[in-house]
Amino acid sequence: MNAFLYIAFFVATAFASPVKDEAIVDVVQDTEGYYKYSFVSKNITREEERQHDGSVKGFFSFLDDSGARQTIHYTSGAEGFTAEGDAVPADLPEVAEARKQHEVISEKIRSLLPALKSDGLVDEVPEVPLTKEEFLQAVSEVLNPSINVAVPDSPETVEAKKEFYKSFQSALE
C-alpha cells in the first residue's frame, strides 16, 4: 500500500513540474562589425542583423496577454529608428505636437547653417556667415529666447582669473 502511495506521489510530482521553455540561440559575427543574432523559444522570437555600415534590421515576436502572437519589425540606420507592427502604439497627441515643434526648431537651426547640404554632410570649404559666438547666440535664441549665451570674458576678468589660479596653486603647495 505504501509503495502504491509513493509511486502515485512521484507520478503526480512529475506531471505537476513546470514545463521549461527551451530556447535556441544562434550568433554569427565577424571582426568588422557585422553580426546576425537569433533567439527562438516557445513564447519569444527575435532576429537581428547588423551590417558593416552600422545599420540594423530585425524583428521580434511575443505572445500578448490574450495569447495572440505580436510581431514587430524594426530598422535603425542613417534615417533613424523605425518600428512597425500591430503592437506598436500610435503617437499620442503630445508626441505628435512635439514632433512638429522639433521640425520647426530644426529648420530654424538649419537656416543658420547654409553650408550644410540636404544629406547632412558639410561642404569641403563651408561658407560660415557667423562666428562661433554669433552662431551659439542665434541657436540659443531659436531654442529658448529667454536664455543667453555666456558673454566672453573681458581683459579684466581674464587677469582676475589668472591671479585667482596663481593664488590657488600656491595654496595647494
Image: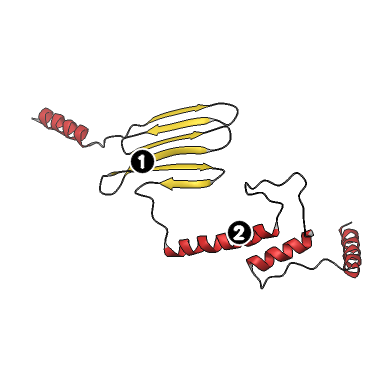
The one of 126 and 68 positioned closer to us in this rendering: 126
| Apparent side of residue 165 relative to residue 84 in the rendered image (left or right) | right
Residue 171, how many percent across, how many down?
Answer: 88, 61
Mark whose residue sits in front, 1 or 2: 2
Up-down relation of residue 159 to residue 123 (above or below): below
Q: Amino acid at mark 1?
A: Ser
Dividing the picture into quadrants, the one containing residue 140 is bottom right
Q: Is residue 170 above or below residue 157?
A: above
Where in the figure is residue 150, as x and y percent of width and height?
76, 67
| Residue carrying label 2 | 106
Residue located 54% across and 38% down the image? 55
Identity of the residue furthest to the left in this view: 1
Q: Is residue 39 left or right of residue 10?
A: right
How many marks overall? 2
- Which residue sits at x=47%, y=28%? 27
Residue 22 position in % (x across, y down): 33, 32
Point out residue 159 in the picture as x, y percentages from the top left corner.
Answer: 91, 66
Disc marking residue 134? none
Q: Nearer the viewer, residue 46 or 80?
A: 80
**SS at badge 2:** helix
Query: Left or right: 152 with respect to 56?
Result: right
For image coordinates 54% across by 64% down, the residue present is 101
The residue positioned 68% from the left and 68% from the top of the image is 141
Residue at mark 1? 61
